[in-house]
Image (cartoon, grey):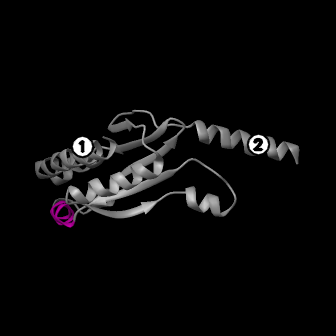
Amino acid sequence: MRAVLIVVLSIWASVAQADVTAREGWVVMKTTKSYGQLVDDVKAAVKANKMGVVTQAGPTAAAKARGITIPGNRVIGVFNNKFAVRILALSTAAMIEAPVRMYVTEADSGATLSYKTPSFVFAPYLDEAGPDLSVAAKELDAIFKAIAEAAAG
């Protein structure tokens, strides 16, 4: 039993200390906001920028229901039908990437907002879709930047 407890505490400690770090194609914004506040602020900023919260998922509540406490962790899928129709006309395959996701994680010092830029997400489809996909992705880059700045600010 003691060995199991040590393993569980070790896993929990590694999860609690985990943080998202910058990597190619990602924007990572650390904030001093609480996890719940940042989730709410992302949703409000999405709406203010005329986009929609299409999906939400995270293991935090399900883990809590199982008696396990982990740091807040929420993936928020963001998109708008006008971009969906536009991109679908360019590449059926590219639509697997929609909605583009924003990721809110909880840390000891606040919450972090991360996302892959739409230009990075849609880059693998540019040869197939042509330059119009790049134009749409750059428009989405600006919208996602505005959402992130409003939410993290």
Q: Nearer the viewer, residue 84 or 130?
A: 84
**Is-magenta flag for residue 86?**
yes
Q: Nearer the viewer, residue 47 or 33?
A: 33
Quadrant in which the C terminus is drawn: top left
Q: What residue sits 68% from the left and 62% below the top?
A: 66
Residue under pointer 1: 145
Region in magenta: 81-89
- Distance between mark 2 and mark 1 Cα atoms: 40 Å
Q: Amino acid at mark 1?
A: Lys
Question: Residue 84 at x, y = what percent?
Answer: 21, 64
Which of label 2 and label 1 is nearer to you?
A: 1
Q: Residue furthest right?
A: 1
- Secondary structure mostly taken by the magenta-highlighted segment of the chain: helix
Question: Residue 19 at x, y = what percent?
Answer: 51, 37
Question: Residue 53 at x, y = what percent?
Answer: 32, 62
Circle 1 packing at 10 Å, graded few (<14), some (14-19), many (20+), is some
Q: Amino acid at mark 2?
A: Val
Residue under pointer 2: 7
Q: What residue sits 39% from the left and 43% below the top?
A: 113
- Verify CB contact (< 8 Å) between mark 2 and mark 1: no
